[in-house]
Image (spheres, grey):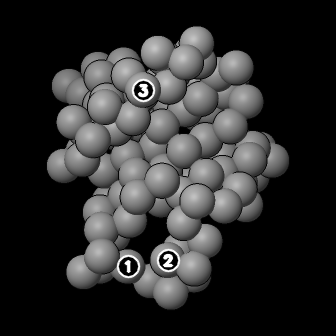
Amino acid sequence: MKIFIAHSLGLTSKAIKHAEALEAEGYETYVPGRDTPQHLCAKEIYKRNVEAIKEADEVHVIWDGTSQGTLFDLGAAYALGKPILIVYVKMRTWHSFLLEHVGEML
């Protein structure tokens, strides 16, 4: 099973730790902060992330409440009909819908 981990760049280390735990269980993961070259222009980053989301079986979200790129990835995952698991949302910037659904597949 392939899992795309959408995340805020400020939470890359948290996303990588989540990926490592999943990889230890035999899952294949894609972490944009680790696997998408960040020196590329935003359009190319989004393009590569969408391709990785297409290949994923599900998408996990680790969000700081501010990252527009994470919202883009989340929207792409939703549009592609991918199951979405909210793993972490930074508490001081949460919004009620996300907080109510932490740990649930959407």
Amino acid of disc 3: Ala
Which comes before the other along the chain, label 3 or label 2? 3
Position of residue 72 measured from the top left corner of the image (x, y, whole percent): 50, 54
Which of discs 1 and 3 lies nearer the camera? The answer is 3
Q: Are marks 1 and 2 in contact (CB under 8 Å)?
A: yes
Amino acid of disc 1: Trp
Count residues near mark 2 (Cα–Cα under 10 Å), then give few for <14, some for 14-19, many for 20+: some
In the rendered image, is residue 99 in sight?
Answer: yes
22 up-or-down from 24: above or below: below
Position of residue 16 measured from the top left corner of the image (x, y, whole percent): 31, 29
Amino acid of disc 2: Leu
Q: Secondary structure at mark 2?
A: helix
Which comes before the other along the chain, label 1 or label 2? 1
Residue at 73 percent of width and 61 percent of height: 106
Q: Nearer the viewer, residue 41 or 99?
A: 99
Q: Secondary structure at mark 3?
A: helix
67 up-or-down from 4: above or below: below
Residue position marked by numbered label 2 in the rendering: 99
Which comes before the other along the chain, label 1 or label 3? 3
Residue at 68 percent of width and 37 percent of height: 58
Residue position marked by numbered label 1 in the rendering: 94
